[in-house]
Image: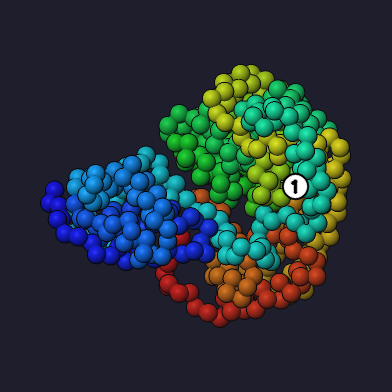
Amino acid sequence: MKTSTGVASSLLLRLDSRSHAPLHEQLFEGIRARILAGALAPGLRLPSSRQLATELDVARSTVLQAMDALTAEGYLVAQAGSCTRVAPELPILSGDRSREPGLAAAARASSSGKGPRLAASTRALKASPVGAPRLGAAPRAFRPGVPALDLFPTALWARTVSRVHARASTGLLDGGDPSGHAPLREAIATHVSVSRGVRCSSEQVFITAGTQQAFDEVLRLALNPGDSVWVEDPGYPGARRAVLAAGGRPVPIPVDGDGLDVGEGLARAPRARVALVAPSHQYPLGVTLSLARRMALLQWAERTRSLIIEDDYDSEFRHRGRPFTALQGLDDAGCVVYVGTFSKSMFPGLRLGFLVVPPSLVDVFSAARAAAPAPASTLEQAALALFLVEGHFARHLRRMRAAYRERGEALLEALHADCSGVLTPRPCDTGMQVCASLASPLSDLRVRDEAARLGVEVAALSDYFLGRRRESGLIFGFGGVRPDALREGTRTLARALEAARLRPPQWKGRTR
């Protein structure tokens, strides 16, 4: 490699005394970036530490600390009693970057689309729809999936966390059991047995960092590359993405008024390895899997020795009457893995969930967890266990059921008043979102975009189909919207509907 014998009279660097990063770290990163970008050529002699200290108006010790770190990592070569130079032999990552000052080479490499080779399944993963866009940091009407954070007992939760932190044992601080904090597993087993009809012991409960991690863990243990998985269509995009990430092949199975069409699943992929379903409150349509189809699904799984992943994300929020019994409670063959989350029942930032595995799979999941770190902070797990044991969680659920019933009814009334004839809401008796069919020939994608332009978030039903789109509609989340703000949101939506009706499609002839 050709090296420079010149001298850099100045590095033209600037340090920010207001930054959280120490000055020596800023100097280290600045010089390193200029070396990697080719602005400081191999062999180039750098100014002395005194000169740099004067130029940058910092202590010489700051400069020496940065130089020592750069020398230790091989970017600089220090000659005793002489000078410091850029290392004459630096590995080239992509082309001759010494000829390309700045980050032009990196930008060109990124735009070329070239990079490390990945599995073929990542192409399908990249193309998989991600559902409703997140258009702002703060939730607005009617973003799906947002609970009533305004009603969460923040002060009570803070006191519970403080008590746990104040009494933390060495075991808690050490990280705990990879399967999860034992008292939390016991509390969850008790809770789901009473409230959801799940039949389990605490040994069958494994704590996760949320629903998505639970899907990933189960699918990676259950699937061989290319195995078929039944997924609901329309359905939760995170489910199909988890299947693709695990190397499986998602097979879209239509959902109708009775839930997943098991007969269609048998026709499309009779030997599928896994079925991933939300039987108690399907997302996004909100339907319940009928008893006949529940039994047919269980019989299929037992006959083919397949696994059913039951996603029970928010069915505890049944507005009237008790929640439906979980599918797991009907399973006598040990085919169902039950997945729950606290992101909807408490708050998304908690990042805690769980799965309940059949007794025959406890050893397998325990072995898989043996070399893994704890799924979440043991201190937070301990706080949640205390929150459950002391009855705070059950009281919170009762309050939320009443709140979601009130907000759901207010939304249906507002939609009837402002959008009647254009939107037809489906029945809403569980959870915190509602699906409404959109009158033809309006495009739900165009309505979604018009609503976003006016400051309202709705999700387009089209984004939730994996196979052929069979219906146009909108998904409304009402959990995080106070009743007084719902009417304002539907009035704005009415303007978006009118604009979408008048505005021609941006791309004529475009199909999904």
At label 1, counting other C-alpha atoms closer than 10 Å, the crowd grade (few under 14, some 14-19, many 20 or more) is: many
Q: Report the side of 358 relative to 112 (left or right).
A: right
Please name whichever residue, 426 or 358, is drawn nearer the observer in this view of the structure: 358
Percent of width and height locating residue 442 = 57, 71
State left or right for residue 214 relative to residue 92: right
Estimate the x, y position of residue 279 in percent, counting from the top left.
69, 41
* Residue 363 spot, x, y in % from top left: 61, 18
At 64% from the left edge and 70% from the top edge, which residue is drawn? Answer: 456
Residue shown at the point (21%, 55%) measured from the top left: 45
Please name the residue that numbered disc 1 is placed on.
345
Q: Out of 284 and 437, give the one closest to the viewer.
A: 284
In this view, 436 is above or below 2: below
Say whether residue 36 is left or right of residue 20.
left
Residue 330 showing in the rendered view: no
Residue that extends furthest to the bottom in the rendered view of this protein = 502
Residue that appears at 75% across and 23% down: 201
Farthest residue in the front direction?
Answer: 81
Please state which amino acid type lies under the numbered disc 1. Answer: Ser
Where residue 508 appears, as percent x and y from the top left, is 42, 73
**Quadrant in which residue 138 is drawn:** bottom right
- For image coordinates 43% across by 50% down, the residue present is 126
- Classify residue 31 by image quadrant: bottom left
* Secondary element type, mark 1: loop
Residue 416 to residue 281: above or below: below
